[in-house]
Amino acid sequence: MKPAPILSQPSMDPSNQELPKSENHPPAIEVHDLTAAYGTQPVLWDVDLEIPEGSLVAIVGPNGAGKSTLLKAVLGLIQPLTGWVKIFGEEYSKKRSWVGYVPQRETVDWDFPTTALDVVTMGLYGRLGWFRLPRRSHKEQALACLDKLGVAHLAHRQISQLSGGQQQRVFLARALAQDARLYLMDEPFAGVDVKTEKAVIELLKQLREEGRTVIAVHHDLQTVNDYFDHVVLLNLRLVASGPVSTTFTDENLNKTYGGRLTALTQAAEALLSKQPDKRN
C-alpha cells in the first residue's frame, strides 16, 4: 500500500484551546462497545474505555492487537461496526480542533517535496484556513516549535534528507504547533535514537504538566513505568486500563500477550455469525 502524502493528514484548528475550568468535566476520550473489523477479520471487539484528562497514556499490546485501529476510530478515520467514541463528551467532528495527531512514520510519504518548516507550519493551517498564506509571525511560531525539539537548524532542509529521528521530531513539532488539548501519537518512539527518544518524552511530560492529554501507542514494555502514568492493555479486546502502578502487572501482561490466536478465532467466528448467509 502506498503511504499517504503528508497533506492528507488531518488538519486542526487550535483556536479554542482553553482548558476546562470546571472539575466536573467529561473524560478526554470515552469509548463504548466499540467493535471494528477489516472485512471478516476482527481488529477490536467490544471495547469500553475511558481516558482521564491530563494524563500521559500508553496503549500496549502485541502486533495486530488493534492499537493503531483504536486511534483511527477515535479520529473518525474508520467506521466501527458497533459502538461510539466521544471526545470531551462530544463527537469527534465537534472537537476536531482540540485533537493533534502524529501518525506512524511508515504511513507518511517522506518524498513529498517540502521543507521541515513547511511541515510544521501545516499545524497552523486550522487557525489560518487552507487558502490563506502564513505570515511571518506564523513561520516564527513554527520555527519555535522546531527549536523545542532541537531541530530548528533543519528548518529549510527537505524532509526527505532528514534521518528517521529528525523526521519524527519534525512531526512532533507540527503537533506542538497545533496547540491541541488531546494528542494521539502512533509509535512516537519507533526507530528513533536515544537522544530523540529523550527529547520526545520530555516534550510529552511537558504537555501533561500543561494539562494536556497524550495517548501514545508504545512497544517498549521496559519504559512504560518511567514514561507513562496510565496504561491501556489491548489484545483485540480491552484487557485492562488504569494507572500504571496498579494496572501494569505481570498478570495483566500475561493476559495481553498470551492466547492471541484463540481470541482472534473466537471473535472471527462471532463476527461471521452476525452476518447474513449469502448462500441462500
Image (cartoon, helix red, strand yellow):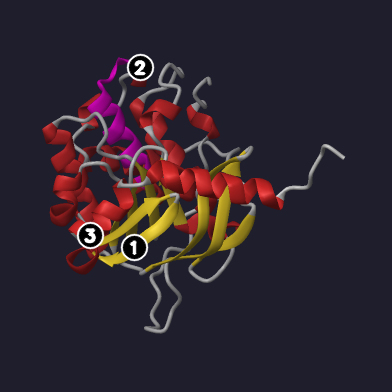
Of the two numbered discs 2 and 3 on the same chain, state the one appearing first in sequence: 2
Which residue is at 27% across, 34% downward?
190
Of the two numbered discs 1 and 2 on the same chain, state the one appearing first in sequence: 2
Residue at the spot of label 2? 160
Tell me the SS state at disc 3: helix
Residue at the spot of label 3? 251
In the displayed structure, 84 sits above or below 138; it is below
- Residue 25 vs residue 257: left or right? right
Which residue is at 25% across, 38% downward?
189
Q: Is residue 60 visible?
A: no
Residue 37 in the image: state x and y as whole percent. Answer: 58, 44
Range of magenta residues: 160-175
Residues at discs 1 and 3 in contact (Cβ within 8 Å): no
Outermost residue toward the right? 280
Residue at the spot of label 1? 240
Of the two numbered discs 1 and 3 on the same chain, state the one appearing first in sequence: 1
Nearer mark to the viewer, of 2 and 3: 3
